[in-house]
Image (spheres, grey):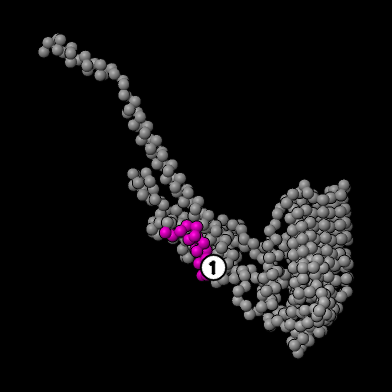
């Protein structure tokens, strides 16, 4: 082979060896594969997180529904309602069975240790587990992870709901409107004053450590110029808070149940009759004035331990003389109810359906509850869809006043001990009161479970 022939062959080979055009294609291919892998991870991980979010929302909703309905349903029925709710959120035709009845457990929850103890008879806590699992034929499918052998992922979430009862609703002054307290009052440890509007205070009030005064906007607190200087302990007691006073919604349901003991369509959270009512059958009467003894004598001396529906006989006011203490009865009236001076209520419940601002009132000296130094029993409840007014010497011991309207009262010194006042309007109190925490003797007061997500 001649020199010229070799030169002709080597020249193109040399140019090819030195030519760098198109060399980026190999690098680009490597980068493409890398980006595709990252994209695959991002796409499938995002899908898993989205599925987990759906499951968590469903678990939270189901846990709340199961526990809420457990208070007046058997375990199986309340669990089924929770499953029905999840099936609407995550339709089975698309997601399969995300929640099964065996994954809803009632029990008790220890927040300190984070432990849950199963007890199907419990109404205080529930644990719910929602899931997308291969064994249930509804795992989360992958997209590009299939290329490396992962066609699906199992995902599950838990939720634990528990019940609680706000201490302020057990003992304290709670109002949707303003809470207006005058001067020279003493509030002992643990007592609550809350308004969803504003709290107004005059001078020379004392708040022990552990007292709570709360409202949504602390800047709206209404004080005299002397402010915190003349209200000892107030600044430390202040809290910014809003409260859902949903307990007031129980009044209408409670009245319906008491007046219709044979009905079966009670709404959830309907208040039970007190234990001292041994015969729920309603005794109806129509009078303008009635004494404790006359109430007991209704229906041949079987009036005690009964529910009494008393109309006011062509008038607007029913007067009750309870200077002989009224005990172990429930009284319901469509009229304004006026107690005579010096009336006493113990282990009894009086309800007015009147919407009047003075639908329950007394001139002076009304005592609600037994003065027994916070002993067990003896408490009483005054309940109205209107308002209450007590212009002088109201004494409350281990008892409750609940009104959809306003509550206006005056209390004598050391006359308020173990008091729960709840108003859909305002609460207005006067001066020279000691408002103390009892913790005992309030067993028959109306309470309602609130629910919170514990885990």
- In this view, 127 is above or below 299: above
- Point out the image quarter for the C terminus: bottom right
- In this view, 210 is above or below 147: below
Q: Residue furthest top?
A: 3
- The reply, left or right, for residue 160 in relation to residue 227 is left
Nearer-the-camera pick, 450 or 164: 450
- The reply, left or right, for residue 185 in relation to residue 39 is right
Q: Estimate the x, y position of residue 337 in percent, counting from the top left.
A: 81, 74
Location of residue 369 (image quadrant): bottom right
Indicate the secondary structure of the residue bearing disc 1: helix
Q: Estimate the x, y position of residue 355 in percent, counting from the top left.
A: 77, 68
Q: Residue at x 76, y 57 (%)?
A: 177
Q: Confirm whether residue 370 shows in the render.
A: no
Q: Residue at x 38, y 39 (%)?
A: 37
For residue 80: magenta?
yes
Q: Confirm whether residue 47 shows in the render.
A: yes
Q: Which residue is mark 1?
A: 78
Q: Residue at x 73, y 83 (%)?
A: 283
Q: Estimate the x, y position of residue 15 in percent, counting from the top left.
A: 25, 16
Dominant secondary-structure state across the stretch colored magenta: helix
- In this view, 316 is above or below 161: below
Q: Residue furthest left?
A: 1
Q: Estimate the x, y position of residue 215 in percent, counting from the top left.
A: 74, 53
Location of residue 411 (image quadrant): bottom right
Q: Residue furthest bottom?
A: 300
- Point out the image quarter for the N terminus: top left
For residue 312: magenta?
no
Nearer-the-camera pick, 241 or 186: 241
Within-10-Å neighbours for mark 1: few <14, some 14–19, many 20+: many
* Bounds of the magenta segment: 76-93
Q: Residue at x 76, y 49 (%)?
A: 218
């Amino acid at each position: 082979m001649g020199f010229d022939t070799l030169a002709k062959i080597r020249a193109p080979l040399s140019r090819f060896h030195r030519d760098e055009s198109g060399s980026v294609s190999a690098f680009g291919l490597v980068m493409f594969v890398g980006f595709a892998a990252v994209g695959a991870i991002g796409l499938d991980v995002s899908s898993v997180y989205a599925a987990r979010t759906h499951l968590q929302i469903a678990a939270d909703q189901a846990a709340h529904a199961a526990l809420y309905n457990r208070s007046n349903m058997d375990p199986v029925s309340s669990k089924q309602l929770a499953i029905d709710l999840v099936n609407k959120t995550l339709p089975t035709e698309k997601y399969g069975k995300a929640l099964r009845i065996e994954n809803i457990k009632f029990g008790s929850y220890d927040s300190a240790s984070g432990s849950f103890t199963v007890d199907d008879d419990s109404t205080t806590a529930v644990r719910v587990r929602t899931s997308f699992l291969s064994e249930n034929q509804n795992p989360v499918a992958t997209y590009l992870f299939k290329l490396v052998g992962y066609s699906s992922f199992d995902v599950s979430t838990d939720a634990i709901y528990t019940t609680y009862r706000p201490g302020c609703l057990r003992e304290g002054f709670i109002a949707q409107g303003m809470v207006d307290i005058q001067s020279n009052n003493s509030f002992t440890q643990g007592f609550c004053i809350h308004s969803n509007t504003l709290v107004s205070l005059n001078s020379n009030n004392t708040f022990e450590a552990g007292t709570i005064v709360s409202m949504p906007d602390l800047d709206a607190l209404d004080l005299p110029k002397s402010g915190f200087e003349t209200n000892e302990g107030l600044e430390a007691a202040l809290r910014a808070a809003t409260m859902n006073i949903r307990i007031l919604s129980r009044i209408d349901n409670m009245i319906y149940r008491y007046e219709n003991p044979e009905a079966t369509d009670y709404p959830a959270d309907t208040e039970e009759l007190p234990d001292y009512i041994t015969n729920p059958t309603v005794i109806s009467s129509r009078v303008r004035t009635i004494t404790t003894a006359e109430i007991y004598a209704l229906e041949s001396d079987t009036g005690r331990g009964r529910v009494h529906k008393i109309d006011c006989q062509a008038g607007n006011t029913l007067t009750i003389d309870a200077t002989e203490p009224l005990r172990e009865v429930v009284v319901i009236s469509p009229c304004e109810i006026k107690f005579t001076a010096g009336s006493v209520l113990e282990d009894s419940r009086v309800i007015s359906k009147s919407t009047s601002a003075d639908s329950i009132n007394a001139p002076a000296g009304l005592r609600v509850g037994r003065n027994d130094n916070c002993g067990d029993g003896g408490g009483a409840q005054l309940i109205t869809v209107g308002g209450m007014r007590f212009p002088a010497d109201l004494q409350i011991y281990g008892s409750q006043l609940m009104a959809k309207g306003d509550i206006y009262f005056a209390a004598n010194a050391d006359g308020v001990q173990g008091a729960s006042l709840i108003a859909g309007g305002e609460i207005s109190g006067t001066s020279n009161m000691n408002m103390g925490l009892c913790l005992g003797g309030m067993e028959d007061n109306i309470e309602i479970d609130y629910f919170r997500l514990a885990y």
